[in-house]
Image: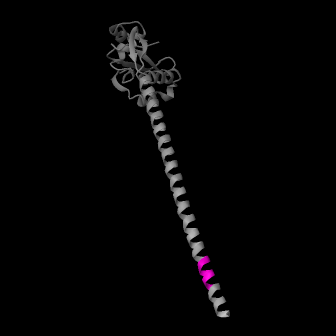
Amino acid sequence: MGLILAFLFIVVIILAIIYWQITLSIIGVIFSIWLTKRIIKNHSRQTIRSQSRDSQWTNRRIRLRRRSMQRHLVTINGRAHELTDVQFVDLNNFRSEVSRLEPKEYDDFLTTWTAKLVDSSKRGNMLYEIKGIIPKKKFKMLRYVDPSTQKQYLCFVPEEIKSADQGMAWKFYLTEEEYDGINAEA
């Protein structure tokens, strides 16, 4: 009898182990299915969010592109120029830099805006040309030293000016010949 009880006890333990293995396997399968569904659901949500974000970025790009296509009408020297947003911002940056320019910063300013030296005279006058801020428009700037104060100055001159001395003559409301006739500037 003791042997049969021992045998039954072992069979019950084996059946219990098999039951728990089957139960744990079923729980594992159910958990795997549940986890897979969650992953698929999250992935689809992320895909939808990502597509939504992409469409938001696309819409934002379209709005920015449309905005950059807006035109600004700017009058310079009596002529109207139609500018895009980017050109308008460049022009405003250029104007603000010119307005707060110090004589010690002239070289940096001219280098930053890629000014090209057009002409220099024996009197130390230098004529620079800056292109690219406004299409088909050149800004000409005259750099000179005031003989009475020995300070350097930088000023705009009309586009038609071809030489540095012609620019100085224009500043003093003289012709180039009259300016050449002046021996010493006061």
Is residue 14 shown in magenta? yes
Can you give x and y, in whole percent of width and height, for residue 173 in the image? Answer: 41, 6
Foreground of the two, 138 or 155: 138
Magenta stretch, main secondary structure class: helix
Q: Residue at horizontal 35%, vertical 13%?
A: 166
- Foreground of the two, 108 or 39: 39
Q: Nearer the viewer, residue 143 or 116?
A: 116
Q: Which residue is at the front of the view, 2 or 49?
A: 2
Q: Is residue 150 visible?
A: no
In the picture shown, does residue 65 fall above or below 27?
A: above
Part of the protein shown in magenta: 10-16
Which residue is pictured at 46% across the width and 27% down the height? 106
Judge left or right: residue 100 versus residue 134: right
Does residue 119 appear to the left or right of 146 in the view shown? left
In the rendered image, the vertical position of residue 27 relative to residue 36, given as above or below = below
Q: Position of residue 142 (x, y in %)?
A: 41, 19
155 magenta-colored: no
Tell me which residue sits at (67%, 93%) in the image.
1
